[in-house]
Amino acid sequence: MNPTSLPFDDLPPLELEESDSSLGRQLEEALSRYFYESCDGVTQALLTNCEWCFTTISTAPTLVINGADRAMSQRVLNHVVAISTALLHFSTSARVLIGSSSEAETLIEIRVDEISAY
């Protein structure tokens, strides 16, 4: 449905309010907690050695993982099937962004519905 054909009351707000941002942070925190708890011990240990968070700003939940260096990011990439399998419990459209804290660029982006390619 074309959003412009909706009545004004049904359109999203033009600007987010503080309560919207607070709810978004709560959602990201809950996703992080439930995701971490659904991972096996090896994946949890790997995540403990990385900076990671969920973001829900895009249309799909996105897990952003930054290893301390390129070697750690490669270890995460080698474990991406287990990470994606855990993410499938939350959304089939979720994405994983893997990067390195020492480098500004994202090394790889993977949608969990593409994981069969790995």
Image (cartoon, grey):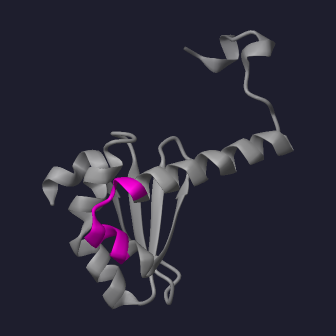
- Looking at the image, residue 12 lies above or below residue 53: above
**On the rendered structure, is 18 left or right of 86?**
right
Q: Quadrant of the N terminus?
A: top right
Q: Locate residue 10, reporting x and y percent.
A: 73, 15
Q: Which residue lies at the image location 49% right of the left edge and 86% below the top edge?
A: 103
Q: So how many labels did they put on this image?
A: 0
**On the rendered structure, is 114 left or right of 51?**
left
Q: Locate residue 25, reporting x and y percent.
A: 67, 51
Q: Is residue 51 magenta?
A: no
Q: Quadrant of the C terminus?
A: bottom left
| Of the pair 44 and 75, the residue shown nearer to us | 44
Q: Which residue lies at the image location 29% right of the left edge and 68% below the top edge?
A: 41
State whether the magenta stretch is mostly helix, strand or loop.
helix
- Looking at the image, residue 86 lies above or below residue 97: above
Q: Which residue lies at the image location 15% right of the left edge and 51% below the top edge?
A: 116
Examine the image and state in which quarter residue 99 appears: bottom left
Boundaries of the magenta span:
37-46
- Residue 106 visible to the viewer: no
**On the rendered structure, is 96 left or right of 23?**
left
Instruction: Kindly give the residue lying farthest to the left in the view shown.
Output: 117
Q: Locate residue 82, reporting x and y percent.
A: 23, 60
Q: Locate residue 51, reporting x and y percent.
A: 51, 76
- Residue 27 visible to the viewer: yes
**On the rendered structure, is 100 left or right of 104?**
left
